[in-house]
Image (cartoon, rainbow, N blue to C red):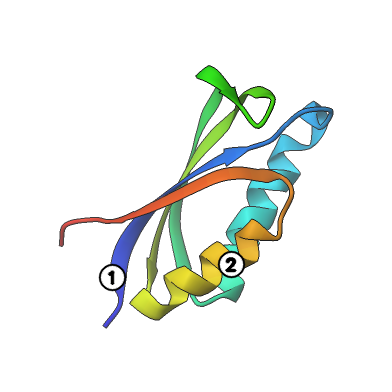
Amino acid sequence: MKRKYEGVIILNTIGKEESIDKMVSRVGETIESEGGKLQQIDRLGRKDFAYPSNKIQGGFYVNYFFEAEPASIEKIQTALKLNDEVHVQHYQVLAA
């Protein structure tokens, strides 16, 4: 049974400011290749962290809204852990 998810992804944009659109689309492609069906992408913009995280002062926040099987979330997380452009990822199930 597919569920609706919201994924908050923080992209590491250090030295990559000109390619944010490419980074956003690559993450979306990864979600789709692992079994998700994208519904909406919201670019929230660059924000600073309250404290440095792994020597990074901030990142580019993006919300991905998609449908997927629960087993696909683990595959998506694993695939994005291998992507050095993704600094933080968090997923939650949206109410029906």
Residue sitting nearer the eye, 59 or 33 = 59
Q: Where is residue 93 drawn, in percent x and y?
A: 27, 59
Residue sitting nearer the eye, 67 or 73 = 73
Q: Name the residue under label 1.
A: 3
Total numbered labels placed on residues in the image? 2
Which residue occupies 51% across, 39% down? 62
Can residue 77 be seen in the rendering of this structure? yes
Label 1 secondary element: strand
Which residue occupies 53% across, 18% down? 51
Q: Where is residue 56 drawn, in percent x and y?
A: 67, 25
Q: Name the residue under label 2.
A: 78
Does 82 appear above or below 41? below
Which residue occupies 39% across, 54% down? 91
What amino acid type is highlighted by mark number 1?
Arg
What amino acid type is highlighted by mark number 2?
Thr
**Residue 33 as seen in the image, left or right of residue 2:** right
